[in-house]
Image: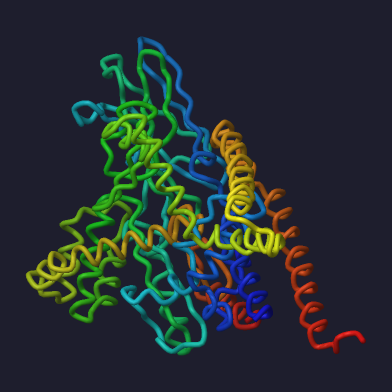
Amino acid sequence: MPRQFYLRLITSLFVALWSLSAAAQQQDLLQAEEAFRLAVERGNNETIEMRWQIEDGYYLYRDHLEAKNPATGETVTLHTDPGIVEAEDANFGPSEVYYLEAVAWLGADAPGEVAITYQGCKKDSICYPPMTVALDTGSLQLSEPVVGFGIAAPSSPSAKNTEIGGFTLADETQNGGMIGSLLASGGALWVIASFLIFGLLLAFTPCVLPMYPILSATLAREGEALTARRGFVLSSAYVLAMAAACGLLGIVAAWSGQNLQMVLQSPYAISAVAVLFVVLAHGWCRSSMSSVSSFSEPPPG
Amino acid sequence: MQIHRIHRTATPFAAAAWDRRSILMGLTALIGAGLVTRVRADDLSAEMILNDPDAPIGGNPNGDLNIVSFFDYNCPFCKRTVDPLSAVLASDGNIRHIYKDWPILAQSSVSGAKLALAAKYQNRYEDAYRALMGIEGSRIPEDRMRQALQTAGFDMAQLEADANEYDADITTLLQRNNAQAEGLGLRGTPVFLVGQFLVASALDEAGFRQVVKDARDAA
């Protein structure tokens, strides 16, 4: 049994680390927003100049550079220079592409907000999905790029709703997510009540199951002296202390927002956790092995 | 050519043991350490990637090595790899090829993927795949895709009917493929998982042979 558990633990560790390592293995492949960096400035005669800095070995397609009015969906004229003709394949037609730098201009008649779409590839490697940014032509402020297509471009920099074909990859936070919908349907009390119920349901998840033997051991230690009242006090102390600790961790995590995720996904954090697990697994395995062997020894005396 | 090591996804031990329970236990362990990250374990078992019952299979279905390809019908580098890969599959004879339609480059990619997967119900997925991959260029209008399928001898009425009837199944398959690709952190197309190696590159025939050899040696 412990051996099986040990094997399982190791396997599940692989599953957990696999996704993280796959991302790490593609480190020589840049993220699209790193490969194609867009900056905007005002040019002569009220025109707006968009300049993409393109990493070496990557290129943008000329005919995939597009500007749209997100409100009406109409195409906005975008002026571009001719690019280099690149034969992506001997058998297939050539495309006009830009290496290292691409420049495009919007005329003075551009609407207040323009959705700019661009798409490129790494030569002989992969092609990236199109990216769309919302440009405020007054302040020249750019939104974060939204990856994907089929979007009329984000209506505001914060709204992200990427639709890919028949399925929508919506940013949950757009409408406040689950909490937002709970708030809308029943107010603050309803949110608190729901979380109490979700919390109770959590008691049946495998994540909480390991706590039961700890609590039962605590109670069993009292032996005959254990009364219902004493049991309740002990259980409450355990549960409240755990809840308080997890609550504090939750507040810290929420407070730090995305940064915590970023930090935890860094190679250092991942390596540290991997090492910690190996150490824990060894310790666990050794202790369970020794407990197995101590059972088989004859009792002293 | 870029070759990256990934964990042993193809060994029988791993394949048999990546069940939901072990994933949950892994997550429990992570939570226990107070360091849970956004692990998309649900979408990421090797079993789901290698043995999705709805994903089309080519090559030798009982082969000893898996090649999973993530591709898009508007992707020029994917098109470039079609012939070299099929040459290697044919001459090797012992490779299982798993097709992962991952339409991310243009709207017409989605339509193309749906039509190709509808051809599965006529047992002609690979014909449709070849027809669509054979169209030159990177932004192919839907009409040209239909034309290519017609030229390949497809009964378009039947194909449309299947596409409509099985739309829900096809869409959820595309969603699963997308979830797997995102879970793996893939950034674009094409990507090949060859045994335990991940290759994001337009390989030629020699390149494929080399990775296949490396994957077998490492297994």
Task: Judge from the rendering whether residue B156 lies leftward or rightward of residue A219; answer left or right.
Answer: left
Which residue does the image show at 56% across and 74% down from the upper left?
Answer: B9
Q: Nearer the viewer, residue A15 or B165?
A: A15
Quadrant where the image shows the C terminus of chain B? bottom right
Residue A107 can be seen, yes or no? yes
Rendered location of residue A112, percent (x, y) = 29, 17
Which residue does the image show at 27% across and 43% down from the upper left?
Answer: A150
Q: Nearer the viewer, residue A111 or B52?
A: B52
Q: Is residue A178 above or below residue A26?
A: above
Quadrant where the image shows the N terminus of chain B? bottom right
Q: Residue furthest right?
A: A301
Residue A187 figure quarter: top left
Rendered location of residue B209, percent (x, y) = 55, 79
Q: Residue furthest left?
A: B157
Rendered location of residue B199, percent (x, y) = 54, 65
Task: Judge from the rendering whether residue A176 lies leftward or rightward of residue B170; answer left or right.
Answer: right
Residue B22 figure quarter: bottom right
Q: Nearer the viewer, residue A135 or A157?
A: A157
Rendered location of residue B190, percent (x, y) = 44, 61
Task: Judge from the rendering whether residue B47 lies leftward or rightward of residue A232; answer left or right.
Answer: left
Which residue does the image show at 26% across and 56% down from the upper left?
Answer: B110
User: Colour scheme used in the picture?
Assistant: rainbow
Q: Nearer the viewer, residue B43 or A296?
A: A296
Residue A124 can be seen, yes or no? no
Q: What is the tally of numbered marks visible in this picture?
A: 0
Q: Is residue B200 above or below residue A98?
A: below
Which residue does the image show at 51% across and 70% down from the upper left?
Answer: B21
